[in-house]
Image: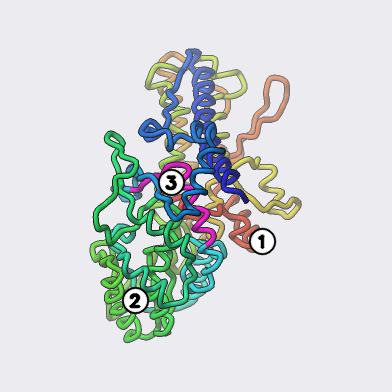
Amino acid sequence: MPFEDDLLAECRKLILRHEQYAQDIRDDDDRRSDRTGRPHRGTVHRPSYWSADRAFNPYKVRSSATSIAYAIQRALAAGQYAPYNPIAYEVPKGDGATRRVSVFPVADATVSRRVYKSLLEKNQARFSSYSFAYRSDLSAHDAIRHISSELNGRDRVFLAEYDFTKFFDSISHDYVWRIIKDHGFLVSPLEKNVLDSFLTTNLQSQGSYQRLERCAEKDFGLPQGTSISLFLANVAAWELDRTLERLGVGFARYADDTLIWSNDYSLICKASDTLSSISQKIGAELNFRKSHGISIFTPEGTPVELKSKACVEFVGYKFDSRGTGMRASAVARIKRRISYLIWVNLLEPLTSGENSPSRLTPTIDRDYQVMLWQIRRYLYGDLSEKKLRRLISGRARRIHFPGVMAYFPLVSDISQLKELDGWLAHTIWTSLNKRRRILMSRGIHDFPIPHGLSESQLLKARTRTKDGVEIDLRMPSFVRIGTCINQAATAHGPNAVGRKSGPLHYEYDI
């Protein structure tokens, strides 16, 4: 494919992402105006780094795509290509801290992606089958299946859990080039020039951006936010993966997250020593503050002679005697989102004095109806309760699922999903009662469906419009959507059913 076509595709992707965000703002404005009877105008913000240099703005790059593509192709052919410097920005992490990453200009991101795909296609077979990140043939879902199959049914097994300190920021350039040279990785002279040029870029701030100001004698660190760094990160961990394989321990590695297990305590100790020594070669030290070290994985309450744990987490999942479920941080994020939808529909308009009495029609509380639809869409995507039940019963077929639970197609812990269903029903019921009390204090005493229903009645509530059209007010269910997606994953595979980015993407980006 010509480079110009790739460049235009990158521009279209970024423009579509921005315009979808702007449309979401407008849709929210319309919903708020309907609820309150007053106009709302949310502010659409463009990414701040677009103003640092026109090379970051996909609209401007698209308008000059032909000339930009021609100039880059000539520079690549002459061995003179040099990407513009990236701009730094902060991404929130699940623990409340931030992750500093970088964004490259649109054209340079396109070059990086092309080179990454070429390197991956030629060298993918060189990577360990237990290295699951940044590959086209394996994913986070494959890592979860591997771990689940290895740990399921074991009464006790030794685990080693370690995390690196600023893995990408610390990787030694010399070490990476030595691995490439000594272990059969295929890198053309053009690709090596591109890799070198990205490794010497200088992370810039938006306020004082300089396109080509380079770092002096930079010999460590991979720029985050560009595709080629993903390939180089796997190269950096190649020796670690091979050594663990030769030791004979079980393991799974996703980027810098490494989980190791064995029935032999001496082997798990050797694996920990290996991890420590190779981390020094890589240049990325182990983070002992976040690492759990060696422990015995065994059901809760089992007598043990060492530190034990009944639950282990990896990527977006957790594993325990009940099966495979969502990790605690993922559950907390889902609860926060649903709690926000409940608040913004049922209570926020009342506390801000913006509630419109017309929302309480003779047959239904429309704010409750909108809230229910929004929660259902968050969990189910575009599936209705009727369609979901047809899928579960096998009367309909579907592979792709757009809701948030599509990030977790391998959840088998039904007890966790039941707990979430109970939390959802109770939270909605208590919020609805609070809404009723506030409205009664304002002189309203005639309430439509679903006011006055018990918690169990809310689960299967229905009503009709004044024209007799049925409105489905059944409460969404984690058990139903989880069961449906798990059935589809069993039939078609989790990579076909689930979100391609996997649960790790959900942890950081949703």
User: Of the residues tagged 2 and 3, which is closer to the observer?
Assistant: 3
Residue labelled with disc 1: 492
Q: Position of residue 165 (x, y in %)?
A: 27, 61
Q: Quadrant of the C terminus?
A: top left
User: Sequence order check: which comes first, mark 1 or mark 3?
Assistant: 1
Question: What segment carries the magenta color?
Answer: 101-118
The residue positioned 49% from the left and 43% from the top of the image is: 71
Residue labelled with disc 3: 509
Quote the CA–CA distance across marks 2 and 3: 32 Å
Quote the CA–CA distance across marks 1 and 3: 26 Å
Q: Residues within 10 Å of mark 1 (few under 14, many from 20)?
A: few
Q: Residues within 10 Å of mark 3 (few under 14, many from 20)?
A: few
Q: Looking at the image, which is closer to me, 12 or 81? A: 81
Q: Looking at the image, which is closer to me, 413 or 216? A: 216
The residue positioned 50% from the left and 53% from the top of the image is: 113
Q: Is residue 412 visible?
A: no
Q: Which mark is residue 296?
A: 2
Q: Position of residue 494 (x, y in %)?
A: 59, 60
